[in-house]
Image (spheres, rainbow, N blue to C red):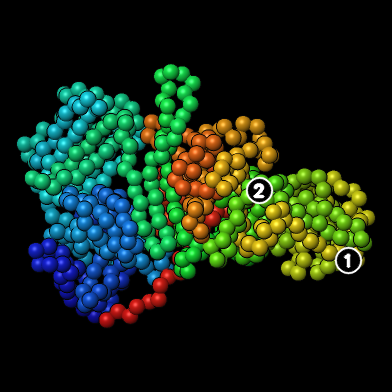
Amino acid sequence: MTYRKTLIPILAACCQFVIADSAPSATPNSGTVIQLNGQPWSGRWLRKVEQGQQNLYVQEDWLTGGLGVQMLDSEKSDRQRLRWFSSPTFSRVAFDSTGRFRYLDLTPFADQWRTEISGNALNIYTPDTLMQAVRRSKQPWGDRLVIDLNRRTPWRVSRQGNVINLIVSAEVASDLPIGLNSIAGNLVKSVTIQPQGKLTQIQIQTNDSINPAIEMLSSPTPRMVIDLRRDYVPPSLTVQWADGLRRIEKIVEIPHKPKNPQDPKTIKFSVTALEVDLKQPRLKVRPIWSNPDGSPNGILGLSPVPQMVEQAQAVGAINGGFFNRIRQLPVGAIREGNRWIAGTALVRGAIAWNEKGETLIDRLNFTEEITANQTKIALTNLNSAYVQRGIARYTPNWGSGYTPLTENELIIVVRGDRVVAQYQGGVVGVGQVTIPSDGYVLVARQSPEAAKQLPVGMTVKGRQAFVPEKFANFPNLIGAGPLLLKNGNLVLDGKAENFQAGFDTQAADRSAIATTKDKGKLLLVTVQEAPNGVAPNLLQTAEVLKKIGAVEALNLDGGSSSTLFLGGNILNRSITEIAPVHNAIAIFITPPPTKPEF
């Protein structure tokens, strides 16, 4: 069969932006590869028929990472404000059929571009561009580099340590000097221009690790201005990412008590957040964990947050509560859809929520007890890797079977309301007892009396208790701690929640979840060091959260676990820096009804 090439203009004639592809019946409407001037990228794209025209949309992070487009504040979920070598413009927003990935229309950037679809790949070809000059100057605050171009063109930047790499889709003019090392800079050691065909790499080596500030100008001709300064503060960004879901990035400054006269009186932190409106009917928030629901491994295992989000088909998430990294099991409470996935043995901070947008953040005291022959026996914990003397309970949510966590455990199998078996465990990690689908197992540790209290044939009944009692009314819950804010007041007390001494004052990347004065709105927040700053402790985290509008707030697991994810992208750190975690708090978007295309 022979296919013919068709050219379908989708912009005004002056823009000369065309889609070249095979016959419509053979052309896919989406893919996961974008090739820019022959260079392949991992990037999602969509082709949509709108008002009789075929329009191309690409995933928003490809625009920012592949073209150098700058995101600007946007209040509408159906259009995104952007800048690219021009005054601010708007790009239309689209979502795929799952509602999980956000795409932006290519139209505002595609002056004289040519595109074609080849299988899974969208090929984009931009016009030949000339790099006409590269100028350097020393400034009172640092150094400036200016790149003059003859037209708008894609560019991207990366940084490794003290080296900044800028790649511009432009050829070097024949009279442009290649070596620029002769000019001494304030912060710059050297600048090297490396032509690579129709690309040019500019490598900037600096004395310190510096984030470049890059501005794109269009008048009188397109040019890029790269400022290198130690005091650079990235601009704030607030994007209405979807209905009821906002993405927020900002630098927050709080008071600081100086230890020495030369110390600053304020300190800055980098804040990345998602604001979720639980009252929005298409938005749901749920705990997720490493394994799929119903897996034989139950809740055993760790995974990076992006992998968990993909597995759960969520749109975004923040890492959740604490876990034992060696045993790969949780040590805090997890409740999902009224199912207790794991309980907690300690009185620690927790957040609970329901479908009505109601929330509760407080210290949770969760207990279980069983009654056997009129004897009440308090249980130590539920589906937890936190082991202690006493009797713990493990349900099918733990997994298909139980393997000893400590030596010489007595494992008691309960089906329905009756003890059906007892097994004497031996070495840690050896042997497995099946957990009945209609019951649970009780594990007695250093409790020799349990064998007589719970003999085979004994009838047992159980009950749960909550303090505060209101926790019992919420179907979803994550435990972590310490509690940071309550009713707008600082309530940080790590000792009261059995955290190790010094935990409150340790400096580390932080994750937190908070409520605001607007009922039903949650903030999923990471707090990290600002450029040339320091990592926050828990007190500073609480103050930052209060400054951005939090009323009640809970600390989540932090450090290398701290991860905020949205629409296929890690928002707060490099993908190479994330660590696997046990559980997360995920955001789900119900996709809108499909509209017929003509």
In this view, 478 is above or below 173: below
- Disc 1 is placed on an element classified as loop
- Looking at the rendered image, the disc whose residue lies closer to the viewer, 1 or 2, is 2
Residue type pointed to by label 2:
Arg
The kind of residue on which mark 1 rests is Thr
**In the image: residue 216, left or right of residue 324:** left
Q: What residue is shown at x 75% (from left), y 54% (from top)?
A: 367
571 above or below 472? Answer: above
Name the foreground residue: 530 vs 98: 530
Residue 170 at least partly seen: yes
Q: Is residue 537 shown left or right of residue 269?
A: right
Residue 387 picture location, percent across and down: 74, 46
Estimate the x, y position of residue 239 in percent, counting from the top left. Answer: 35, 55
Kindly identify which residue carries mark 2.
Answer: 363
Q: Is residue 190 left or right of residue 299?
A: left
Q: Residue furthest left?
A: 175
Element marked by disc 2 = strand
Q: Residues within 10 Å of mark 1 (few under 14, many from 20)?
A: some
Instruction: Tell me which residue sits at (22%, 37%) in the image.
Output: 226
Rendered image: mark on residue 210? none
Quadrant location of the C terminus in the rendered image: bottom left
In the rendered image, is residue 195 in sight?
no
Q: Residue at x 68, y 51 (%)?
A: 364
Badge 2: how crowded within 10 Å, few (<14), some, or many (20+)? Answer: many
Q: Which residue is mark 1?
A: 459
Residue 181, image x, y percentages:
18, 26
Quick check: 598 above or below 490? below
- Counting from the top left corner in percent of width and height, residue 46 is at 30, 67
Task: Please give the name of the residue rendered at 77% of the width and 44% of the height, measured from the top-left corner.
Answer: 388
